[in-house]
């Protein structure tokens, strides 16, 4: 009996060690702690901002406008950002982008506290935040290998997803309750303060900078090399396109959550926070699962399961009218989102050569974040005309058709490791 207990304890420790392998690295521990605090603040702001916009306008269309304003800069700047991320210190670039986003959060807080905030202010600030995010996202994606060894890359990607979705659980819940208690201004102000954590973490890291490569080609030529690589690589090309489709049709429904909380579930700002937190809870479970089984090389199978399960969950969600069941289904949707996003990210990162990492992740980020505002805009427009429930159902049917098409035309995706 004692031997069995020791064996079980050993297996348990091994599983835990595999799940959190990237945390063995000093730089990644700093990153995880600092970024988690910052992301909690970001989701507090996002939750409060969406509900404030709906309160000011009473229009789901404006929710789409704000999301589009935040996402459209990705289309314009992300490819350039990927080139810059391959040419300069990624840590320095992230300190600049995080500082810019901190300042914007404080500006939004000041406008809200003063009572001057208007919907157009929020749209402009969202666009400026989107510009900073366009430079930050590909840099952040390609920075992982500067914090961990290559053997822990997949685990670090999964833990990044866990951290992001822990923030989705905590941030919206706090943001929704704080909005109800003291108003949105404090959500924006605390988000500004939260950026200090990641800035300090970045400054404390011990980064060994590689020797700068000789730069004979122009930035435009470098960009063309990255684009040519992606377009000529069948697997990476397909994965990035798939990611764009799921962002376009799947994430648009998240934009509608403030309207869903009020119109469908007859709730308030706290209800909105609970819905977003439920999605985050499901995503955390998915990310931890992927972190623990990262060495089993079944990413393609997990991706396929998520691609079919996501539209099914969305169809069920569109028909539900009670909060507890909505929370459960949104947790399932969060699991599917993470299974798709994390598997895609890990497979792409594994296939990309280091010298092209910034540019390829720039293209990856462009497609993912560029599709999101377009999907959010059309989700807002459709919801304005046909209602939130029909919009979610329509997107779900399109996603299911796309998943079937990929399974028929590219069955090799299921076998990817």
Image (spheres, rainbow, N blue to C red):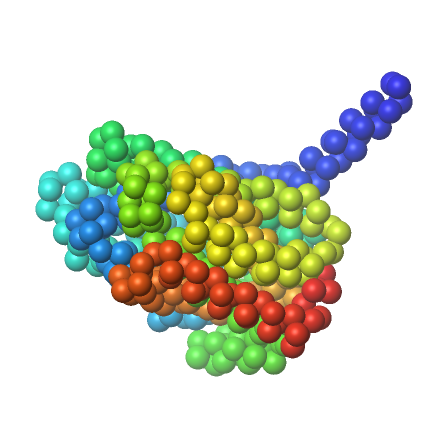
* Residue drawn at x 14%, y 48% as measured from the top left: 117
Percent position of residue 384, x then y: 26, 61
Whether residue 74 is visible here, answered yes or no, is no
Q: Is residue 34 above or below residue 56?
A: above
* Residue drawn at x 54%, y 57% as measured from the top left: 312
Farthest top residue? Answer: 2
Percent position of residue 139, x then y: 47, 58
Q: Is residue 368 left or right of residue 154?
A: left
* Residue drawn at x 20%, y 46% as measured from the top left: 55
Answer with the quarter of the image where residue 249 lies.
bottom left
The quadrant the N terminus occupies is: top right
Q: Is residue 78 left or right of residue 21?
A: left
Q: Is residue 185 above or below residue 76?
A: above
Whether residue 265 is visible here, answered yes or no, is yes
User: In front here: 227 or 56?
Assistant: 56
The quadrant the C terminus occupies is: bottom right
* Residue drawn at x 52%, y 77% as measured from the top left: 227
User: In front here: 27 or 245?
Assistant: 245
Answer with the quarter of the image where residue 415 lies.
bottom right
Percent position of residue 241, x then y: 53, 71
User: In front here: 137 or 268?
Assistant: 268
């Amino acid at each position: 009996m004692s031997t069995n207990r020791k064996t079980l304890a050993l297996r348990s420790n091994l599983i835990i060690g595999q799940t959190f392998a990237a945390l063995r690295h000093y730089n990644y521990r700093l990153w995880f702690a600092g970024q988690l605090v910052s992301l909690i603040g970001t989701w507090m702001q996002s939750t409060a901002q969406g509900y404030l916009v709906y309160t000011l306008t009473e229009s789901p269309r404006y929710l789409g406008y704000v999301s589009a304003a935040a996402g459209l800069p990705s289309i314009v700047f992300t490819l350039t950002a990927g080139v810059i991320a391959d040419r300069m210190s990624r840590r320095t670039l992230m300190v600049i982008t995080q500082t810019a986003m901190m300042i914007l959060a404080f500006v939004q807080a000041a406008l809200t506290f003063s009572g001057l905030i208007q919907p157009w202010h929020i749209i402009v600030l969202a666009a400026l935040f989107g510009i900073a995010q366009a430079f930050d996202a590909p840099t952040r994606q390609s920075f992982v290998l500067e914090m961990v060894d290559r053997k822990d890359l997949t685990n670090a990607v999964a833990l990044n997803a866990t951290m992001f979705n822990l923030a989705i659980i905590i941030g919206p819940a706090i943001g929704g309750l704080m909005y109800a208690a003291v108003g949105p201004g404090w959500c924006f102000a605390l988000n500004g303060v939260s950026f200090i954590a990641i800035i300090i973490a970045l400054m404390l890291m011990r980064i060994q900078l590689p020797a700068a490569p000789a730069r004979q080609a122009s930035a435009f030529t470098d960009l063309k090399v990255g684009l040519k690589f992606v377009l000529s690589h069948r697997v990476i090309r397909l994965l990035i396109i798939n990611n764009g489709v799921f962002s376009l049709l799947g994430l648009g429904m998240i934009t509608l959550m403030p309207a869903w909380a009020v119109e469908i579930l007859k709730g308030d700002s706290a209800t909105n926070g609970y819905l977003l937190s439920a999605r985050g809870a499901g995503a955390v479970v998915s990310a931890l699962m992927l972190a623990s089984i990262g060495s089993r090389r079944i990413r393609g199978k997990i991706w396929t399961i998520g691609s079919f399960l996501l539209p099914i969950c969305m169809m069920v969600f569109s028909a539900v009218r009670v909060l507890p069941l909505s929370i459960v289904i949104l947790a399932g949707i969060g699991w599917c989102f993470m299974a798709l996003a994390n598997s895609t990210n890990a497979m792409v990162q594994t296939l990309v050569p280091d010298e092209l990492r910034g540019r390829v992740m720039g293209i990856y980020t462009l497609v993912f974040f560029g599709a999101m505002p377009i999907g959010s805009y059309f989700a807002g427009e459709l919801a304005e005309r046909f209602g939130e429930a029909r919009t979610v159902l329509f997107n779900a049917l399109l996603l299911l058709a796309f998943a079937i098409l990929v399974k028929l035309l590219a069955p090799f995706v299921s076998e990817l490791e």
